[in-house]
Amino acid sequence: MRVSWQERFAETPDVLKSAERLQTVIPVLDFTVGGDEFITMAGPCSVETEAQLIETALRVRRSGARILRGGAFKPRSSPYAFQGHGREGLKMLAHARVESGLAIVTEVMSECDVPLVAEFADILQIGSRNMENFSLLEAAARSGRPILLKRGMMATVADMLRSAQIILDNGNTNVMLCERGIRTFETATRNTFDVTAIALLKQISHLPVIADPSHAAGNRDLVPALARIAVAAEADGLIVEVHPDPDKAWSDGDQSLDHDAFDAMMASIEPYLALRGPACSPRPMELIG
Ligand code: PEP
Ligand code: MN
């Protein structure tokens, strides 16, 4: 007999769909994540300069993005690489919000910084490297801000759901689950985009699912195709790295789209969104076995 999803993920009951909760809809500024609208978050990997940020914010807004991304605290692979502007970067993000009307998502790396980042950001991003930093999860949850929880690069779906459950246990149900690629034996791409996880999460969890094609691919040429795949897999939204001049980006330039490429990507997902129709509306988890 096949094991039901409820049994398989019994450790994290509150993140699973139930008769009472089919879909979490998260209010952010004047829109929602997890509702009818497909939400795109876009912007540079790192906040670099005020001019770069505002220019990108205005452009991505015009192409349909709702949320500006940009790191002020950067978890870099090298300790000698740019680590982010910290508080100054947060101030630039806040200014970009005023100028563009976009909401802000930005990473918080340390529990000590939660109050500071929560003061400036509409959504707190928990990065891949911190998905199992449980004290950070607890502090971020208690800030009351919605959380974008990125999947650890070596985390299973069950591991990610466990981290989400911890956030819920700390009184915050506004959690978005983000698939950003995992490490596999494949080295041609930065990570392997686990589209199965997106389909699975949409099947079993009421939490909105966001796809990050940029960190999955590590290469801008692949980002639009992965974005379209995420739409077809019924993700609730995207987070995409965009830079006015990607070859000069201070981090993750290889995977960043320039403004025109972002416009083209946004146009290219439209027909796929139109095809989804009612198939995307919340539905009960299929009981198996
Ligand atoms: C980022 O969003 O720039 C980032 C560092 O992402 P991840 O935690 O998925 O590597
Ligand atoms: Mn990045």
Image: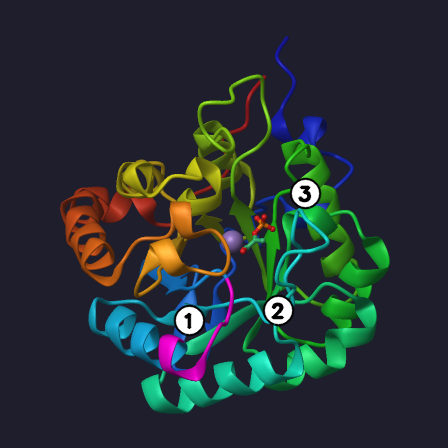
Helix or strand or loop: what does disc 3 sit on? helix
Could you say which quadrant of the image residue 254 lies in? Answer: top left
In the image, taking residue 136 as reference, residue 241 lies left or right, namely left
Whole-percent x and y of residue 143? 72, 76
Query: Looking at the image, is 159 positioned above or below residue 99?
Result: above
User: Disc 1 vs disc 2: Cβ atoms closer than 8 Å?
Assistant: no
Dot 3, crowdedness within 10 Å: few (<14), some or many (≥20)?
Answer: many
In the figure, 25 relative to 130: above or below? below
**Residue occupying image coordinates x 69% and y 51%:** 164
> Who comes first in sequence, dot 1 or dot 2?
1
Looking at the picture, how far across and down is residue 108, in whole percent? 68, 67
Mark toward the viewer: 1 or 3: 1
Return the disc, 2 or 3, that comes first in the chain's sequence: 2
- Which residue lies under the disc numbered 1? 68
The answer to whether 192 appears left or right of 54 in the picture is right
Look at the image and tell me whether residue 102 can be seen. no
The residue under the point 32% across, 72% down is 56
Residue type of the residue flagged with mark 3: Leu
Label 2 secondary element: loop
Q: Secondary structure at mark 1?
A: strand
Q: Which residues are magenta?
A: 46-52
Above or below 145: residue 7: above
Name which of mark 1 and mark 3 comes first in the sequence.
Answer: 1
- Residue 6 seen: yes
The residue indicated by pointer 3 is 161
